[in-house]
Image (cartoon, grey):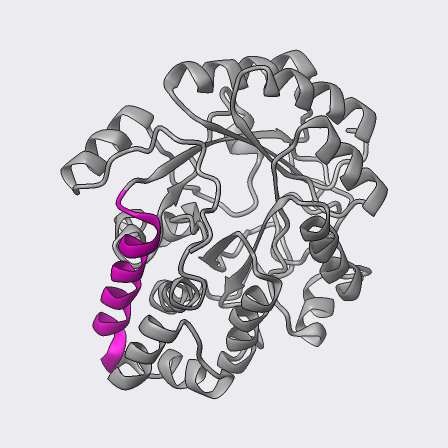
Amino acid sequence: MRKLVEKARIQHHLTKEEIVLLLNNADINDDLFKAADDVRREFVGDEVHLRALIEFSNYCRCNCKYCGIRAENKLAERYRLKREEIINYARKAVDFGYKTIVMQSGEDLTFSTEYLTQIIREIKTLNVALTLSIGERSYEEYKILKDAGADRFLLRIETTDKILYEKMHPKSDFENRKKCLYNLKKLGFETGSGCLVGLPEQTLESLADDILFFKELDADMIGIGPFIPHPQTPLKDVPHGSFELALKVMAITRLLLPDINIPATTAMETINPNGRFIALKSGANVVMPNVTGGDYCEKYEIYPNKAAVDYSELTRKLQEAGRNVSQEKGFRKKG
């Protein structure tokens, strides 16, 4: 097992069978996490990139079985931020020192490409990198958003197991999801994806396929978190995913894609009170605090009891841990 970890650390390559062996072996965890941390330090350094998350709409046309803002959840309190509100949150984030703004929503087509373009252009005058996380759109729409100034796009695959994907995402098209990711890469977006760990019927083999898909896509950012059940979804009675297994998937992803950006996800902190810092010591180099104010944080409830992040407290703890906040925009620097 240690030879496999060393192979991944040096060659940044593993077969599916080798990934499954590592995922299935708890004795190797400390070696795996240390190797991922070493590779993180070597390729992306000790700086942590903080990215301001603005959750601007919790309307969604999709019915993902694990998600609290799914279309059929009639108990969700819906909201849409106005353009001026989004811009104001972005300005406040820049004043705090954020170098990247992340605009995230459900798949809300009320925010047309034209309307989003107006917002993008205004935010880009603030001299920040801009990430969109708004779901599936056409190639032509993605191109318009890119031409308007959007730098990055997050579109999580959640699982590359087609059968499981279709069970979790009723009436969604798995092949179109993949196509969207490759379209984003083709258009020059820094492209992010990710997976949920702990979905019902998910196997270690399927998680290995997820990691290899990220490698094949040459993703620029990967977010990995444990599944957390929401009480107003069909998966409300399913146990939450394993923090340890999610951490291992993240660590192996770092070893195979050494120079990418990997967030210490909020879901990890929600499952484990110290999860964010454990992740930062196991290969992660990004934190995405939510800067959406008021009641919006509670209403954008993909899963319950999301861990909050205080900017000042976070920067202090990072410094105590020997990790400084980056003053750069955090684009991937391919090694």
Asked if residue 277 is positioned above or below residue 248 in the image, the reply reads above
Which quadrant is the N terminus positioned in? bottom left
Q: Residue at x 80, y 30 (%)?
A: 113
Residue 138 at least partly seen: no
- Which quadrant of the structure image shows residue 47? top left
- What stretch of residues is rendered in magenta? 27-46
Residue 234 is a magenta residue: no
Please state if 333 lies on the left or on the right of 318 as rendered.
right
Please state if 76 lies on the left or on the right of 147 as rendered.
left
Q: Position of residue 218 (x, y in %)?
A: 57, 61
Asked if residue 159 is positioned above or below residue 153 in the image, the reply reads below
Q: Residue at x 67, y 28 (%)?
A: 149
Q: Position of residue 258 (x, y in %)?
A: 40, 60
Nearer to us in this view, 61 or 246: 246
Nearer to us in this view, 327 or 204: 327
Residue 320 at least partly seen: yes
Nearer to us in this view, 287 or 190: 190
Asked if residue 191 is positioned above or below residue 17 in the image, the reply reads above
Please state if 7 lies on the left or on the right of 332 as rendered.
left
Which quadrant is the C terminus positioned in? bottom left
Most distant residue in the front direction = 335
